[in-house]
Amino acid sequence: MNAYPKLPEFDYIKPQSYKEASQFLISHAGEARLFIGGTDLFVQMRDRVYKPKYLVDVKGLDGMDEITFLPSQGLTIGAGVNMNRVIADAHIKQHYPILAEAAESVASYQLRTRASIVGNICNASPAGDTIGACLLLEGVLIIFGEDGEREETLSTFFLGPGKTTLRAGDVVAAIRFPIPPDGMKGRYIKLGRNQLSDLSIVGVTVLGYPEGESDSGYHFELALASVAPIPLVVKQVGEILGREPITDDTLQEAARAAMDVCTPIDDVRGSAKYRKLMVRNLSYNALKDVWGQLTGESR
Ligand SMILES: Cc1cc2nc3c(=O)[nH]c(=O)nc-3n(C[C@H](O)[C@H](O)[C@H](O)COP(=O)(O)OP(=O)(O)OC[C@H]3O[C@@H](n4cnc5c(N)ncnc54)[C@H](O)[C@@H]3O)c2cc1C
């Protein structure tokens, strides 16, 4: 048996407009699949998860290749922008560093010249490393579909492993982020089996910023990768760290809350029990790191 079979044969389609792409996908539903970098799709085709007759390359469409930052509106990343460009972008480094940090944890430099943030999201793996940052930064997808353009918030986008709210004919054109709150700090901690090119066993994204309205004076958010059927935002963390002055005890309580709500499974990368314990430990480390950044005690 050949462990690495070739890709099945396919026709390559390069549409000239969103409308043409969308119409082709609708009229060839079940036979056509769109791609950006192909780093998920080609592996799935090699493994015969998908055997599309047509591959629709949408990278060349209007705006796909652009990163735009407007101080009054925020950041827009075109679906065709690869992760190395996200990491290198000066505006992203300054205003959304957690996005660059998460992207930098993905595989290798070589892979990141192909892999995109939007592909990471649309593939909808619970292990997607950039998804936590995109969720906590309140990302909104700009989608071109059968009825024209619409926006969809990321918080309701994921339905299960590999399942999203995308419909036949939908092409995600970009992801948009609002201006982040003043003084926001973040941290992404990824636990993999090695430092290079492995999916996460556990991924923890934390954001925190000063907030006058909460009793603690701060707002925190935490998202988890690889420990539930969909990327998980742990609301309890914000509640615990908002209601009283932040101490080592409250950071530990928040980390335990993250452990309690996640529902990992056993798989080749780690057992459910190990993952739960790592969620607690890494959530504590990430929360403590962000708290240190906010109070000027670290980084
Ligand atoms: C060796 C290797 C290592 C990897 N390591 C990591 C890792 O460490 N962390 C991690 O998170 N991922 C990892 N991955 C997975 C993959 O690289 C990422 O998920 C990547 O971000 C996918 O982006 P892409 O542009 O290549 O997506 P593609 O493969 O082009 O697309 C992925 C899926 O999304 C759909 N899609 C893509 N673009 C659109 C669009 N514009 N509109 C609608 N649907 C769309 C496609 O139809 C497909 O189903 C790895 C993959 C490989 C091969």
Image (cartoon, rainbow, N blue to C red):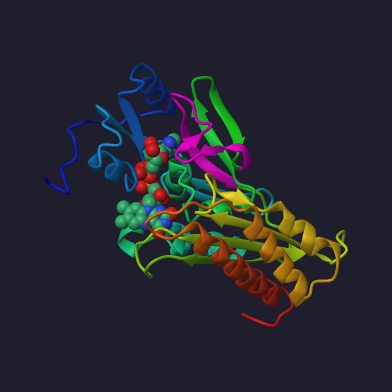
In the foreground, 164 or 298: 164
* Whether residue 212 can be seen here: yes
> 159 or 274: nearer the eye?
274
Q: Which residues are magenta?
A: 155-176
- For this view, does 23 lie left or right of residue 147? left
Q: Which residue reaches farthest left?
A: 1
Q: Which quadrant of the figure contains the C terminus? A: bottom right
**Residue for point 59% across, 42% down:** 154
Q: Which percent across, then down, holds residue 156?
A: 62, 38
- Quadrant, the N terminus: top left
Magenta highlight on residue 162: yes
Q: Quadrant of residue 266?
A: bottom left
The answer, for residue 82, to whether it is visible in the render is no
Question: Does 273 lie within the magenta span?
Answer: no
Q: In this view, which residue lies farthest toward the bottom?
A: 297
The residue depicted at 69 percent of the width and 77 percent of the height is 292
Q: Measured along the vertical axis of the image, is residue 273 above or below residue 66?
A: below
Q: Position of residue 167 (x, y in %)?
A: 48, 26
253 or 109, which lies in front?
Answer: 253
Residue beneath the point at 38% across and 66% down? 193
Residue 150: quadrant of the picture:
top right
Q: Position of residue 38 (x, y in %)?
A: 32, 44
Q: Is residue 250 left or right of residue 212?
A: left
* Mark count: 0
From this viewpoint, which residue is outermost toward the top?
27
Quadrant assignment, res 49: top left
x, y (%) of residue 109? 34, 64
At 70% across and 70% down in the image, what residue appears? 252
